[in-house]
Amino acid sequence: MSLRSATKQVLLGLSYHVRGALLWDLLHRSRIRLLIYHGIPSRAATDGVTNHYGYNVTAGELEEHLRYLDRRCHVMRLDDALAGRELSRTKINAVVTFDDGYENNYTNAFRLLKRFEMPAVFALTTGFVREREPLWNDVVEYAVTRSPRTDAAISWDGEVRIWSLADRAGRLALYQWLLARCTRIDQARREELIDEVLRALETPGGTEAILELEDYRPLTTEQVAEMASSELVELASHSVHHYLLTGLGKDRRRAELVESRREMQELTGRPCKTFCVPGGQYDAAIVQEAFDAGYARVLTSDGGFTFPGRRLMGRLGILHRTNRAAFADMVHGPVGPVLRRLRLGG
């Protein structure tokens, strides 16, 4: 651990124990923090490259986070937060969101939210939920982890690359290369690349086998209906195919926005007012296209705080193994914001 990292850990621990977060809230009144979660598995998976970047937070971790939010924060419905209704002036105002539409959002997250009587937004990828199309990043993760090969030749755009799969380091290098390629190419070609990967890696069972695994399964329509009937839940759109919208032409972007909103309204029987940007990539044109498609607000992955009345809002991603002191500082400050200001100030 570097000296800078060690110093930050000491400061996080000190801030947590002297209630620095609560003092910071008093100095920065009426702020709203939007938090993003993704999959909520029952246990931490450790095989291969599974959850390498920590996007999936275990049910036990989520329970600890919700317990903290219940004690130290004012957790709100998104509608109330954006309308400025009943904002706390002494605590951070928090909105909890979940992206993608994993079944464990129902079996684990929704169960915990009901216990704490805590509202949340669930953004669903409609192709994943309605058509049971595995999410592309899960297919890549599964293929690289489960391949029986010790090496593989992947042919793409006239180039053949040989990858060693003999150890985790080799599989991780391939995984990172695939993630980068899948996010940079024309999104209309993404399935073509993934099909080549499945062929080259000789992935057992293909994409059908992925949905047999608990942590990769989507919500069922019955689970969505039950969640939609709860006063704790708002259901939002996360597109149809989880394409990076900046990598699509205008007509296909519009289809993703319009069709996912229509499908969400068919699933829930409610108006769909919120669009959560897939993959974090967007520009001003995409935001306007979302508004033109009928959404009232757009949620991104930009972090930061928001305030009532805004239609474009950043959210902060919460990762696996975020300890209690670090989680408190991510939600409130002051350590992270102060250190960033000091670095910006030279």
Image (cartoon, helix red, strand yellow):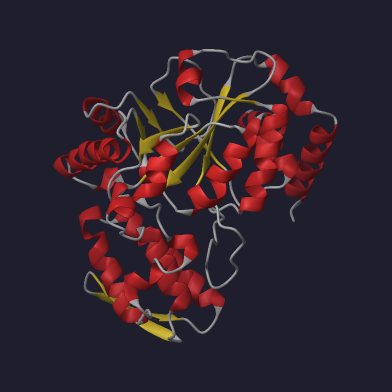
Viewer can see residue 287:
yes
**Image position, residue 309 (x, y; %):** 43, 14
Viewer can see residue 321:
no
**Image position, residue 326 (x, y; %):** 70, 41
Of 212 and 39, nearer the camera is 212
In the figure, 121 relative to 106: above or below? above
- Quadrant position of the C terminus in the picture: top right
Indicate left or right for 293 with 122 as reference: left
**Image position, residue 298 (x, y; %):** 37, 29
Q: What is the tally of numbered marks visible in this picture?
A: 0
- Quadrant position of the N terminus in the picture: bottom right
In the figure, 305 relative to 61: above or below? above
Of 155 and 101, nearer the camera is 101
Indicate left or right for 198 with 142 as reference: left
Residue found at x 56% / y 50% = 108
The quadrant in which residue 74 appears is top right
Residue found at x 27% / y 34% = 286
